[in-house]
Image (cartoon, helix red, strand yellow):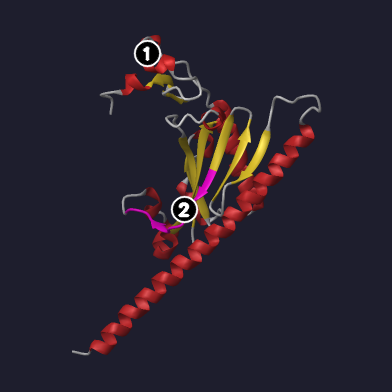
Amino acid sequence: MNTSNSSDTIYQKVIKKAALKQDVYSNTMDSFKIFRETIMRVTENFKLVLPPDEKRITFEYKDKGEFEFEMKFAGDILIFVMHTNIFEFSRNHEVMKTSYIKEDIERSYCGVINIYNFLADSFKYNRENDIGYLIGRIFINKDMHYFTEGKRELGWMYNNFSSAVINKENVYNIIEKAIEYTINFDLLTPPYENVKEVTVYDMQTSIDNMRIITGKRLGFKFQADQEGIK
């Protein structure tokens, strides 16, 4: 048995896969930088249209590290997070059925940028039980092509993967759609029956630390109401 040839083949496979993932990672990092720079530009542009005497409305960018930043506007926060790993889609995923992937399976390896929506008050008042929502995620491959998965405005057709390339204009459109979705995604009042009971502990706790879970589709619910609910 020629173990040398077998080992060489394994080594080449390792090198090829590692190089592919490094290429995808580099593209994802470059894309994340474009998102960061665009968000900074968006926040500056907002200040130009905000009436000088309007002090109640904010539009702010905050750097949270190499792989995370946030944009706060009005009562909402959008948090952009780049995952440091590279993913491939399952065989049953719709994108795997496209001709773009069938022509070159390496195109299915992608980095991911996630967009989360939280209420600004959740962080302001340190409400650790509050709920945030993944409203969209952007997949970037070795060709710098991308597609998005998400709610309504952020939804994308998989067959655009073959033609959609990450650039400043497309990134701006994604951010604009994320903002549009967020401002239309309102906090709902919960059913009265869900919040009619409250514990003595909750009432004796200061409002800043009250164990109330708040989310746009929860409205708000006391922690005690969640027991037994999966």
The residue tagged 1 is 200
Instruction: Answer with left or right where residue 63 lies relative to residue 3.
Output: right
Q: Percent position (x, y) of residue 5? A: 28, 87
Residue type indicated by callout 2 = His
Instruction: Answer with left or right where residue 1 lies relative to residue 98.
Output: left
**Label 2 vs label 1, nearer the camera:** 1
Q: Which numbered circle lies on residue 83?
A: 2
Q: Percent position (x, y) of residue 181? A: 55, 32
- Name which residue lies at 52% across and 39% down: 154
Magenta-drawn stretch contains 171: no
**Element under disc 1:** helix
**Stretch in magenta:** 80-90
Q: Percent position (x, y) of residue 110? A: 45, 57
Q: Quadrant of the N terminus?
A: bottom left
Instruction: Answer with left or right where residue 56 lies relative to residue 157.
Output: right
- Name which residue lies at 45% across and 68% down: 20
Q: Quadrant of the C terminus?
A: top left
Residue type indicated by callout 1 = Val
- Name which residue lies at 31% across and 78% down: 10
Magenta-drawn stretch contains 85: yes
C-alpha gap between disc 2 and disc 1: 42 Å
Camera-side residue of 157 and 63: 63
Few, some or many residues within 10 Å of mark 1 (<14, 14–19, 20+): few
Q: Is residue 163 visible?
A: yes
Q: Earlier in the sequence, mark 2 or mark 1?
A: 2
Few, some or many residues within 10 Å of mark 2 (<14, 14–19, 20+): some
